[in-house]
Image: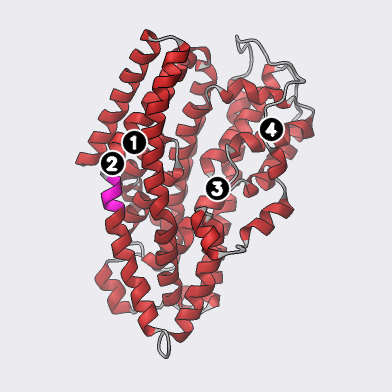
Amino acid sequence: MNKQTTLIIVAMLLGIVTGYVCNSLFDAAAAKEIAGYFAMVTDIFLRLIKMIIAPLIFATLVAGMAGMGDARTVGRIGGKAVGWFLMASFVSLFIGLIFANLLHPGANVGVPLPDVAASAGLKTSALNLKDFLTHVFPRNFFEAMANNEILQILIFSVFVGLAIGQLRDTKAGLLARSIEEVVPVMLKVTDYVMRFAPIGVFAAVANVVTIQGLGVLLVYGKFMGSFYVALAVLWAVLVFAGFVVLKGDVFRVVKAMRQPMLLGFSTASSESAYPRVMEELKTLGVRERVIGFVLPLGYSFNLDGSMIYTAFASLFIAQAYGIPLSLEQQIVMLLVLMVSSKGIAGVPRSSLVVVAAVLPMFHLPEAGVLLIMGIDHFLDMGRTATNVLGNGIATTVVAKWENAIGTQEDEEEAGAALPSPAAAE
C-alpha cells in the first residue's frame, strides 16, 4: 500500500470521527452550517479534478486516434468495447434482481413509507432517447469542454484525431507532436491535483456524516448490507470475466485499481478517480490510444455499479410497498432499465432518476425514491467504486484483445499503428 492510499484511508477515518462528533455535539441547524464548510472543501477539490478532465481526455484521445491510422481500427475497438459494456450491464442488472429477490431488503423496512402521491422532485423528463442522442453531439466544442461533457468531447476528439492521423505525414506533423506533448503535461498537473486528495476525502466524508449521522446506517442496515453483498458478488463476477481474458494479469489490474476505487468510494465521484485510473492503466502497460478511447466511453456506458443499484432499488421499493412483481415483470423491468440507463450520462443523481422514471411503468409509486434518498450517498460510494473497477477491467480487456498491452519501449518498437484487422483476427 503506497503512501497516498494510506493517507486517503486515514482521511476517511478522520472524516467519520469528525462528522460523528459534529453531529453529536450540535443541533441540526448548526451541524448543517458546519457541514457546509466541509462541502466547500470537497467542492474545491472536485473543481480541481474537473479542471483537468476535459483537456486530459481531449489530448489523450486525439493523440490515440492519430496513431490508430484509420476509422476501421476505431470502429473495431469501439465495437469490442461496447460489446463488453452491454454484457457487463446485463450481468450487473441480473445480479441486482437475483439478490433483491433472495434477501428481500424491502420487507419490514421499519420506517414510515412516503405517501404514494408524493413527488421525488427528480427531473425524469431528462431521461429520453431523443434528447440523449441529440445531446451526444456537441453544438460547440468549447461549450462541451467547459461543461465536461465527456461524450461530446469524445465525438469531437475522434474526428480531430482521425483527421490528424491522415495528415500527420504531410501537413499536421507539428500539430500531432504538440498534442502528444500535452499529455505528459496534463498528467503532471494531475499529479499535483491528486496530492490534495486526502483533504478532499476527509471533507467529503465529514460532510455527509455531520448531516446524516451514523444512526441512519442502523435504520437502513438490512438494505445497505444486502446491496453491498450484491456488489461483492458483482466484483467477483467482473474479476472472473477479466480472468477469462487476462488470466493472472487481472489481479494486477485489481491491485492497480485499489487507490482509484478508494478515491471514488470516499468522494462518491467517478470524476475524482478518472485521472488516477488513467495513470494506473498506463503503468500496467495499456497503450494510451486504447485508454484514451475506451475509458471515456466506459464512463458513459459502462456503469456496472449504477446498473446493479437501479435493479436493486426498484425491487426494494416494490417490496417496501408490498407490491408483488411476477418473474415476467421483473425480466421486462431488467430490459427497460438496460435501455433507460444508457441515457443517464450527465444527468444529476442519474441512478435515482432512472429508478424514478421506471417505477411508474410497473405501477410502483415514484415516492418510493424518497425512502432511499437520505442514504443515497452511502450507496453511491459503493456503486462509484464498482464503476471504477468495471472500467479498469474493461479497458484492459479491450487492450488485450487489440494486443495493445506492453511497455513504452515495446510500443515505440511496434510503431504507432495497432495491428491490422486481419492480424487481430
Real-space Cα distance between discs 1 and 3? 31 Å
> Looking at the image, which is closer to me, 10 or 121?
121
- Residue 224 screen position, x and y as percent: 51, 22
Left or right of 105, for residue 250: left
Q: Under tag 1, what secondary structure? A: helix
**Mark 1–mark 2 CB contact (< 8 Å):** yes
Q: Residue beneath label 4, please? A: 356
**Mark 1–mark 4 CB contact (< 8 Å):** no
Q: Under tag 3, what secondary structure? A: helix
Q: Is residue 69 above or below residue 273?
A: below
Real-space Cα distance between discs 1 and 2? 6 Å
Q: What amino acid type is highlighted by mark number 3?
A: Ala
Q: What amino acid type is highlighted by mark number 2?
A: Phe
Between disc 4 and disc 2, whose residue precedes? 2
Tell us which disc is closer to us: 3 or 4. Answer: 4
Q: Under tag 4, what secondary structure? A: helix
- Residue 83 screen position, x and y as percent: 58, 58
Q: Under tag 2, what secondary structure? A: loop
Q: Residue beneath label 3, please? A: 88
Task: Specify whether residue 294 is painted magenta.
Answer: no
Residue at image x 59%, y 37%?
351
Tell us which disc is closer to us: 1 or 3. Answer: 1
Real-space Cα distance between discs 3 and 4? 23 Å
Tell us which disc is closer to us: 3 or 2. Answer: 2
Q: Which residues are magenta?
A: 190-194
Tell us which disc is closer to us: 4 or 2. Answer: 2
**Mark 3–mark 2 CB contact (< 8 Å):** no
Tell me the quadrant of the picture where the N terminus can be found: top left
Q: Quadrant of residue 102?
A: top right
- Residue 66 screen position, x and y as percent: 44, 76
Q: Residue beneath label 2, please? A: 196
